[in-house]
Image (cartoon, rainbow, N blue to C red):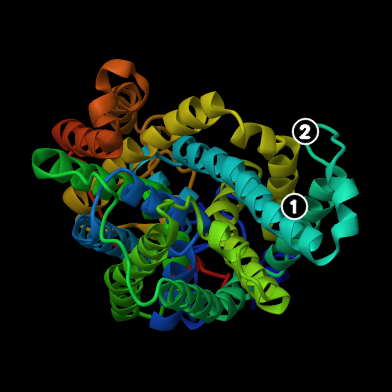
């Protein structure tokens, strides 16, 4: 059974106590049955093989070279970041495998059956904004390719309506529709697309790096003309590693959306080992080859792999490379920015939305915000999205502290779907006041660190500040007297991805 089947009414199985709520339990939010867990280590690896090599990540990493880090500094930053991410994502992934539930349901453990809508909404809003922006960035690559292949189309790129040219609208809507079509077939179709896109991405980026290395006569620059040294260099390394973790602040929250379908803990660990430390070092080598070779050629620091792709002299190779970058961006968007709001919307409107309908709503919202205007506004990107991003650290801290420190991974899965006042996650009217009390001040401080000028020097550490405060405050005030039961969710799991 796949998520495509969720268009039919769910066959809700009621546990013996008869407390399962139709508001909390739907086909798509149900725990995944053991026979429906089809994600092996390769599937977990392909998730990272696609996401790590996104255009945004390349722009960030190449920017480190421009900021003055030498080759060894860049490698050190990625080694440190990959170790931290491996630990955080493995802990988060184990939660999904243990319970089989998506992030909005996972959040009920700490925040309560109604309070969980707070973290789900924050994660969903961030994802919808970035879905639109990433689709726009991919559409610019497609527009450039079409103009290169058919110069007559340039006239469609001169006019503007709501901030976009006619060609921009055509390419954006085409990629928007393709992503919506993929999502409409559920998580298994996303898994298959990832399996296709991952090797395509790795081969394309490797070939691009080798081509640049050959163009530079087999040599690269190991740094810009005035590289950072001493304390300034190490501060930049630490900030780069911290910012790389912040980039994945979304994934460490809702990794359970994917690992709920993992076959075993071992498959999560193996997929994460190859997909994070190994793959990130491979990514760093490609960054070094691209930026170092271009600087060796003409003393110019590129801003993105698209700068190099556009210089490919052969039209056929240019088309292949451009389409590979577009396929990569679509894969990243599906993983990081489409799944999360789908589950969040289903949780908010369980009686009206299923996976397919929620995907359509997410896509429409991603279009309605006119994302190119957001992307071209530094104020919006830095303050709105930056502020929302800073909230992810405290959410992660509270959820992790509750799951691992307080409950020690003992979860009563059926009670996650119960509105019974005696239920384990009912707390006070469905909200856990202690989780909210830990989250609010942690979030306020994290946002202040991220956005206020006096904290500019440490703004890159805002996620860590919020996460550590969330862990500390919640651990200090959590109710340790309430009984904690470990009950499997198989009895009410009717949905298998």
| Displayed quadrant of residue 251 | bottom left
Badge nearest the viewer, 2 or 1: 2
Quadrant into which the N terminus falls? bottom right
Q: Residues within 10 Å of mark 1 (few under 14, many from 20)?
A: some
Q: Position of residue 411 (x, y in %)?
A: 31, 57
Quadrant into which the C terminus falls? bottom right
Q: For mark 2, what is the residue?
A: 163
Q: Residue at x 33, y 72 (%)?
A: 282
The answer to whether residue 350 shows anywhere in this view is: no
Q: Position of residue 145 (x, y in %)?
A: 74, 62
Q: Position of residue 160 (x, y in %)?
A: 84, 35
| Displayed quadrant of residue 328 | bottom right
Q: CA distance from mark 2 to mark 1?
A: 23 Å
Q: 245 left or right of 257?
A: left
Answer with mark 2 or mark 1, whichever residue precedes in sequence: 2
Give the residue furthest to the left.
230
The answer to whether residue 318 shows anywhere in this view is: yes
Q: Nearer the viewer, residue 19 or 206?
A: 206
Q: Residue at x 22, y 56 (%)?
A: 84
Q: Residue at x 59, y 61 (%)?
A: 329
Q: For mark 1, what is the residue?
A: 360
């Amino acid at each position: 059974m796949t998520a495509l089947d969720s268009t039919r009414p769910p066959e809700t199985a009621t546990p013996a106590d008869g407390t399962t709520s139709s508001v909390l339990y739907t086909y798509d939010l149900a725990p995944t049955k053991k026979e429906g867990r089809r994600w092996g280590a390769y599937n977990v690896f392909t998730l990272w093989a696609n996401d790590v090599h996104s255009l945004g990540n390349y722009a960030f990493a190449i920017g480190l070279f421009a900021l003055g880090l030498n080759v060894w500094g860049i490698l050190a930053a990625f080694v440190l970041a990959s170790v931290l991410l491996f630990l955080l994502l493995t802990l988060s992934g184990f939660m999904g495998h243990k319970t089989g539930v998506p992030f909005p349901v996972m959040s009920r453990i700490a925040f309560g059956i109604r309070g969980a809508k707070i973290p789900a909404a924050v994660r969903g809003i961030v994802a919808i904004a970035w879905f639109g922006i990433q689709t726009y960035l991919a559409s610019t690559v497609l527009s450039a390719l079409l103009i290169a292949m058919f110069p007559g189309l340039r006239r469609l790129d001169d006019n503007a309506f709501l901030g976009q040219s006619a060609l921009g609208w055509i390419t954006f809507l085409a990629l928007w529709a393709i992503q919506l079509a993929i999502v409409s077939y559920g998580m298994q179709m996303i898994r298959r697309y990832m399996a296709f896109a991952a090797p395509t991405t790795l081969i394309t980026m490797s070939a691009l790096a080798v081509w640049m290395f050959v163009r530079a006569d087999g040599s690269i620059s190991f740094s810009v003309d005035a590289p950072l040294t001493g304390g300034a260099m190490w501060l930049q390394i630490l900030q780069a590693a911290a910012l790389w973790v912040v980039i994945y602040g979304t994934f460490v929250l809702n990794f359970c959306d994917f690992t709920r379908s993992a076959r075993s803990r071992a498959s999560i660990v193996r997929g994460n080992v190859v997909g994070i430390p190994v793959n990130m070092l491979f990514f760093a080598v490609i960054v070094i080859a691209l930026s170092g070779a271009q600087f060796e050629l003409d003393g110019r620091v590129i801003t993105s792999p698209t700068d190099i792709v556009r210089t490919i002299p052969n039209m056929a190779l240019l088309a292949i490379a451009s389409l590979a970058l577009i396929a990569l961006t679509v894969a990243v968007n599906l993983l990081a920015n489409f799944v999360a709001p789908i589950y969040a919307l289903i949780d908010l409107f369980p009686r009206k939305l299923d996976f397919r309908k929620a995907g359509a709503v997410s896509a429409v919202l991603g279009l309605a915000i006119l994302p190119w205007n957001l992307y071209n506004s530094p104020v919006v990107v830095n303050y709105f999205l930056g502020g929302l991003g800073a909230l992810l650290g405290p959410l992660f801290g509270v959820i992790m502290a509750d799951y691992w420190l307080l409950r020690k991974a003992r979860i009563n899965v059926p009670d996650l779907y119960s509105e019974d006042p005696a239920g384990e996650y009912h707390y006070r009217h469905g909200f856990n006041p202690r989780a909210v009390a830990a989250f609010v001040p942690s979030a306020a401080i994290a946002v202040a660190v991220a956005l206020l000028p006096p904290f500019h020097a440490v703004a890159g550490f805002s996620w860590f500040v919020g996460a550590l405060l969330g862990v500390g405050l919640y651990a200090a005030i959590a109710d340790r007297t309430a009984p904690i039961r470990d009950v499997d969710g198989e009895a009410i799991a009717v949905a298998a991805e």
